[in-house]
Image (cartoon, rainbow, N blue to C red):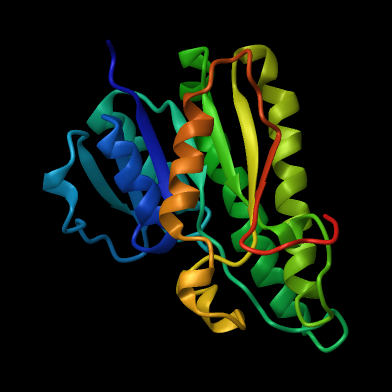
Amino acid sequence: MTVRTALISGGNRGIGAATGRALAGAGWNVSLGMRAPVRPDWADTVPGAIHVHAYDATEPASAAAWVAAARERFGGIDAVVANAGIMVRKDVIEAEDADLEALMQVNVAAPRTLVKAAWEDLVATGRGRVIIVSSLSGKRVKSAISGLYSVSKFAATGLAHAIRHVGFEHGIRVTAVCPGFVATDMGLPLADVPASELTSPEDIARSIAFLIELPNTSSVAEFAVNCRLEESF
């Protein structure tokens, strides 16, 4: 059986690192994209091969370079997990134009550029998989202070749906994964409860691994997960 290969952006920590470990543990080849490439300390404890490469979501050209390096190493790409993201805690009125531009570049434009760079590989497999790590903030606006971030994450969720429409006939299945608070460097400072009460990065990773292993006949467009009761999405 051919070993499949996944690209994971933001692979140095949090959800990205946990997803890399989960997939490599399941036998996938994993290429981790990060601004300062460092081979993870768990790389030699999993059956899948680990590759690390420079990737900066603010630099569009870095996507093509990363994809080319992963293709050279593994021969092709079967899945893209667009996980790298940033947050700006400002409402839509106080925010500067540069704040919105930064959010849209990292949270929306960069995932599109990365998927586009890997597109031929994803089509060639006949069962390519794309995960856009969005947020529950991409399904509802929870507060004024999270509003600007929500704008970018609504766009990220929309991006997942748009890619799904383009790729469906080629066997590409796309899911917008929409977590609430997760116990990561980004999520912990925002939560008003202990880390033990938040969704763990490992739980999100297991969810992603499950989603990309589903057959083409079981397409999941959105996957929402939360550690607390939501009145609505």
**In the rendered image of this protein, does residue 79 appear above or below residue 233?**
above
Residue at x 60%, y 79% (from the top left corner):
191
Residue at x 23%, y 32% (from the top left corner):
73
Q: Position of residue 168 (x, y in %)?
A: 68, 19
Residue at x 58%, y 53% (from the top left corner):
110
Which residue is nearer to you in this view: 32 or 212?
212
Which residue is nearer to you in this view: 179 or 165?
179
**In the visual, does 78 lie left or right of 49?**
right
Q: Tell me the quarter of the image containing the C terminus.
A: bottom right
**In the visual, does 165 lie left or right of 57?**
right
Q: Tell me the quarter of the image containing the N terminus.
A: top left
Q: Position of residue 201 (x, y in %)?
A: 44, 58
Q: Position of residue 65 (x, y in %)?
A: 38, 45
Q: Position of residue 198 (x, y in %)?
A: 53, 67
**Can you name the residue that lies furthest to the left here?**
44
**In the rendered image of this protein, does residue 231 appear above or below residue 159?**
below
**In the visual, does 115 lie left or right of 98?**
left
**In the rendered image of this protein, does residue 118 appear above or below residue 37?**
above
| Image quarter of residue 48 | top left
| Image quarter of residue 91 | bottom right
